[in-house]
Amino acid sequence: MTITLNVPDSNVLTLGGDAVAFDFTLTNPVAAAATQTVGVVASMGHCSCAPGGAKLSPKGSMELFDPNGNTWKPVTFVREGTGMDYLTQPVVPTLTLAPGQTAGYRMRVRLAPDPQVAYTAGTSAITVTLEVPGTLTSLGSATVPVTVQP
């Protein structure tokens, strides 16, 4: 499967500011059906805006658009840390695509200010990763850089 990721509007996230929407599309480009069930994880990468060694992204919230109800549904906000455990938190738990089939999703992310942490302007990334459910195995990812403003 392949992933394309796009931030159609601004790629600037301001702490406490408006949400930034992003779209991703999964495609099964092969002639046979996907033989493995996958999950989809959307995560915030490390951020040069953060103090300390791990450079964790600021905390925040993520939502997945539900086209059936025309509403935004909260999902787990995932920050990449010092290991791979973020792969155990899929926003799309399981998916199997038929040959040539695609699946598209829209999400949005918002970062929250934290009076305990002195964030500065910096860079981070939104990453969408295909994973094997229940494991720490990545099957590929797509990343879009974002700018973070305090």
Image (spheres, helix red, strand yellow):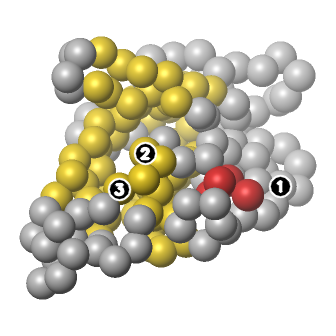
Can see residue 48?
Answer: no
Mark 2 crowdedness (10 Å alpha carbons): few <14, some 14-19, many ≥20 = some
Q: Residue at x 22, y 47 (%)?
A: 104
Which of label 3 and label 2 is nearer to you?
Answer: 3
- SS assignment at label 2: strand
Q: Position of residue 138 (x, y in %)?
A: 55, 71
User: Which residue occupies the foreground of this view, 95 or 105?
Assistant: 95
Asked if marks 3 and 2 touch (Cβ < 8 Å), the reply is yes
Label 2: which residue?
Answer: 92
Residue 95: numbered disc: 3
Q: Secondary structure at mark 1?
A: loop
Q: Which residue is mark 1?
A: 54
Going from N to C along the chain, the mark reached first, 1 or 3, is 1
Q: Inspect the image, locate mark 1, and give the three-letter code of the amino acid beneath it.
A: Ala
Q: Above or below — where is 70 with respect to 62?
A: above
Contact, mark 2 vs mark 1 (Cβ under 8 Å):
no
Q: Specify whether 147 is left or right of 70.
A: right
Task: Give above or below for 88 relative to 116.
Answer: below
